[in-house]
Image: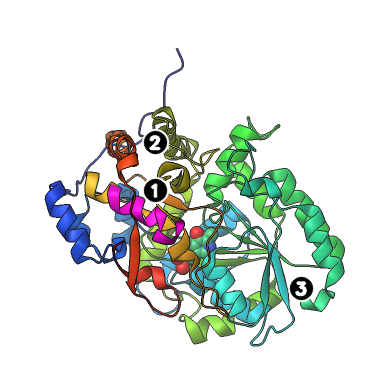
């Protein structure tokens, strides 16, 4: 028979996890005002809050940490990273930054400028920080994702794809000088870690070329995207992940990267560029905001570990286990009858809270209620992607109710074993079995004027 994947690593160092009782957790979450962000990590058994910066580094990465060159200028660790990025992604120019949003800040300062009033940046469901950096400059993000992405019941292999008609409409509606760039997010985090096909990358790139528009990858999960192309897209089965990655990046002019995702480091980011002119323009902002050109907010040891992490993240065996483990959790939940978003994304499983807790009214934060129940049940911490996150309308100050109320279970890279996945599925199944008894949700006691989900205080409704 075909052998299943098994973790392509063994464990050299372990980090003990603290178990706790349901009674303890019920008290802790009450003390935390029913906000999962307020819990201390020791109060959590399995932490699925995010896959950002939570991955485990390999022995090769730790070895590289010892070789870190902490020279202010011209450090060898910088050149290791620069050469790796050129070899893997093909960009001759690179600027290190302290994380992904810093790369956005620097690049957008160069591309959009200080005041982007009247300018638009089309793309596929821009990530929050990306949108934030566009809107902070008074420009606007236009979502051109295909319609299929917004229907959880449709099975489409590349729900991160950009709709070419929607994109061309933007190109026809605005002048060339008011469209500083088009951003393709691979994989598309906001639409559930859904991939973009090579064909779509090619088509978007060709259309942008026709209109003279710069194309940028938001590349946080580029390796996971390449894996989906290999297994789902005609003609890529026999190509290596590294060949697919090289081809993906050959169609764009540059990228911003949050290395906390597919760089498998705990902190870091970078900008990759083909154009010397744009690199020189961005360099000025990198020095102002991040640091000198050969460290830009990262230590030498971090740049070294990132160089190794990028190579490891583009290995087939690593990705097969990584994406396979997420799907393993998804399949177990589906088999228990629990409503989850499909197809499964690359880095997380999204539980459809509205179809799970049908008796909790939408005014009482359904997905947050489910997150609290899962925490009390098994000490598993997910994150709400629903009404709390959607926040209030800036004009009317009314709550915005998004179409989907989701509980995201994000899986760290090389972090947990398949037994942990079985535990998570069992805990959620127990909540599912008593779902009809859960009729009340939560209400807000205190909230911040923006980004309320981080600090909101709630009580039982
Ligand atoms: C995480 C992320 C970012 C921002 O990166 P940080 O390192 O958190 O600043 C940008 N885009 C995408 C798609 C991301 O997932």
- Identify the secondary structure beneath mark 1: strand
Q: Residues within 10 Å of mark 3 (few under 14, many from 20)?
A: many
**Residue bearing the label numbered 1:** 409
User: At 39% across and 36% down in the image, what residue appears?
Assistant: 329
- Identify the secondary structure beneath mark 3: loop
- Which quadrant of the view contains residue 1? top left
Can you give x and y, in whole percent of width and height, for residue 85 in the image?
55, 58
User: At 69% across and 83% down in the image, what residue appears?
Assistant: 116
User: At 63% across and 45% down in the image, what residue appears?
Assistant: 159
- Which residues are the magenta region? 362-373
Apparent side of residue 239 relative to residue 379 in the rendered image (left or right): right
Query: Disc 1 beta carbon < 8 A from ligand 1?
Result: no
Asked if residue 292 is positioned above or below residue 41 in the image, the reply reads below
**Residue bearing the label numbered 2:** 329
Asked if residue 169 is positioned above or below residue 417 in the image, the reply reads below
Can you give x and y, in whole percent of width and height, for residue 353 in the image?
43, 47
Q: CA distance from mark 1 to mark 3?
A: 35 Å
Q: Which of the two labelled residues, at mark 1 and mark 3, occupies the earlier sequence position?
A: 3
Apparent side of residue 323 relative to residue 43 in the rendered image (left or right): right
């Amino acid at each position: 028979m075909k052998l299943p994947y098994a973790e392509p690593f063994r464990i050299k160092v372990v980090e003990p996890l603290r178990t706790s009782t349901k009674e303890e957790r019920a008290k802790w979450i009450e003390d935390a005002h029913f906000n999962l962000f307020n819990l201390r990590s020791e109060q959590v058994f399995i932490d699925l809050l995010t896959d950002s910066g939570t991955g485990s580094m390999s022995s090769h990465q730790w070895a590289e940490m010892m070789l870190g060159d902490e020279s202010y200028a011209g450090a060898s660790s910088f050149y290791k990273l620069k050469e790796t990025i050129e070899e893997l992604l093909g960009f001759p120019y690179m600027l290190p930054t302290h994380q992904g949003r810093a790369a956005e800040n620097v690049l957008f300062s160069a591309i959009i400028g200080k005041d982007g009033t009247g300018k638009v940046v089309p793309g596929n469901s821009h990530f929050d920080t990306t949108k934030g950096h566009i809107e902070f400059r008074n420009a606007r993000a236009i979502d051109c994702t295909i319609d299929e992405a917004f229907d959880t019941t449709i099975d489409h292999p590349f729900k991160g794809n950009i709709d070419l008609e929607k994109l061309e409409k933007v190109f026809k509606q605005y002048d060339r000088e008011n469209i500083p760039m088009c951003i393709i997010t691979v994989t598309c985090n906001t639409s559930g870690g859904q991939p973009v096909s090579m064909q779509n990358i090619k088509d978007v790139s060709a259309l942008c070329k026709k209109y003279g528009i710069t194309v940028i990858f938001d590349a946080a999960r580029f390796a996971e995207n390449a894996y989906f192309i290999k297994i789902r897209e005609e003609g890529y089965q026999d190509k290596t992940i590294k060949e697919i990655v090289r081809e993906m990046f050959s169609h764009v002019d540059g990228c911003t990267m949050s290395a906390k995702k597919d760089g498998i480091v705990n902190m870091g980011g970078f900008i990759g560029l083909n154009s010397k002119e744009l690199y020189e323009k961005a360099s000025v902002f990198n020095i102002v905001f991040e640091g000198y050109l050969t460290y830009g907010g990262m230590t030498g040891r971090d740049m070294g570990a990132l160089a190794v992490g990028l190579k490891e993240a583009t290995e087939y065996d690593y990705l097969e286990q990584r994406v396979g483990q997420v799907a393993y959790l998804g399949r177990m939940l589906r088999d228990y009858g629990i409503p989850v978003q499909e197809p499964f994304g690359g880095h997380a499983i999204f539980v459809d809270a509205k179809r799970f807790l049908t008796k909790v009214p939408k005014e009482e934060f359904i997905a947050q209620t489910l997150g609290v129940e899962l925490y009390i049940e098994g000490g598993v911490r997910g994150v709400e992607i629903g009404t709390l996150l959607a926040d209030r309308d800036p004009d009317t100050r009314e709550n915005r109710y998004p179409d989907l109320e989701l509980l995201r279970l994000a899986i760290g890279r090389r972090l947990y074993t398949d037994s942990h996945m079985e535990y998570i599925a069992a805990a959620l199944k127990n909540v599912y079995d008593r779902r009809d008894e859960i009729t009340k949700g939560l209400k807000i006691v205190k909230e911040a004027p923006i980004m309320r989900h981080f600090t909101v205080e709630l009580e039982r409704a």
